[in-house]
């Protein structure tokens, strides 16, 4: 721009107005006329009172205050669903072993929430729950021979928890490679 001899913004605008052929717009044109000039504005306080009146007639506030003064009655606990198989032993809930994901449940796309990650979290929760039940049974001085088979010490070895399949190991290998690649890119 220094080659054209234009130094300030004001002089640039003058120069641009002569060189650029753009239609002139006047921003001081009168706005469109009011469509219903006789109607004018409305008094919104009257409108609010009218709306409030319709709501008060449909819902009587005095009824709510009498409901609030009545004593509360306990609600019985909801029955367990028919499909639920909650096992208890000496008043303690024995946790169920989480079901491993099927091979076709993982899309192998590296999701943020993978079914295998969720399964691992469920397994961790299961193991911590079993440990808590074992501590409670030990505190209650219940002999280990009477404990359910699933929570006895060493039951993890006897129980056949589903082993990682080929697809899971391939997925884990892919995740390791992606992580290594991200770390290498972060270092460079």
Image (tube, helix red, strand yellow):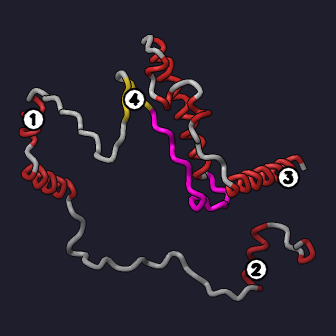
Q: Which image quarter: residue 30? A: bottom left
Q: Read off the magenta span.
A: 95-112
Residue 105, position as x, y percentages in the image:
56, 59
Answer few, some or many: residues within 10 Å of disc 4's Cα (few below 14, many 20 plus, some between 14 and 19): few
Judge left or right: residue 178 versus residue 148: right
For marks 2 and 4, the one nearer the N-term is 2
Q: Quadrant of the N terminus?
A: bottom right
| Residue at x 56% of width, y 52% of height | 101
Which secondary structure, mark 2?
helix
Q: Find the distance from the CA under tag 2 to the CA under tag 3.
A: 48 Å
- The question of residue 108 being in magenta is answered with yes
Which residue has dot 2 on it?
16
Front position in the image: 13 or 63? 63
Please tell me whether mark 1 sits on a helix, a strand or a loop: helix
- Rate crowding at label 3 as few (under 14), some (14 to 19) or many (20 or more) other CA atoms within 10 Å: few
Relative depth, front residue between 1 and 159: 159
Q: Are marks 3 and 4 in contact (CB under 8 Å)?
A: no
Q: Helix, strand, or loop for circle 4?
A: strand
Q: Residue at 68% x, 57% y: name it.
A: 167
- Mark sitting earlier along the chain (3/1): 1
């Amino acid at each position: 721009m220094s080659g054209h001899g234009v130094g300030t913004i004001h002089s640039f605008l003058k120069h641009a107005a002569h060189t650029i052929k753009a239609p002139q717009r006047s921003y001081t044109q009168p706005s469109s006329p009011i469509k219903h000039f006789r109607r004018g504005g409305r008094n919104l306080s009257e409108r609010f009172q009218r709306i409030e009146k319709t709501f008060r007639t449909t819902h009587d506030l005095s009824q709510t205050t009498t409901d609030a003064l009545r004593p509360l009655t306990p609600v019985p606990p909801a029955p367990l669903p028919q499909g639920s198989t909650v096992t208890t032993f000496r008043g303690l809930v024995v946790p169920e072993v989480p079901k491993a994901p099927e091979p076709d449940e993982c899309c192998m796309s590296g999701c943020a929430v993978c079914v295998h990650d969720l399964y691992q979290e469920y397994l961790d929760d299961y193991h911590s729950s079993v440990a808590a039940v074992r501590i409670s049974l030990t505190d209650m001085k219940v002999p280990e021979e009477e404990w359910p088979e699933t929570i006895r010490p060493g039951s993890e070895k006897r129980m056949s928890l589903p082993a990682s399949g080929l697809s899971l190991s391939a997925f884990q290998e892919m995740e390791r490679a992606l992580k290594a690649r991200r770390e290498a890119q972060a270092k460079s």
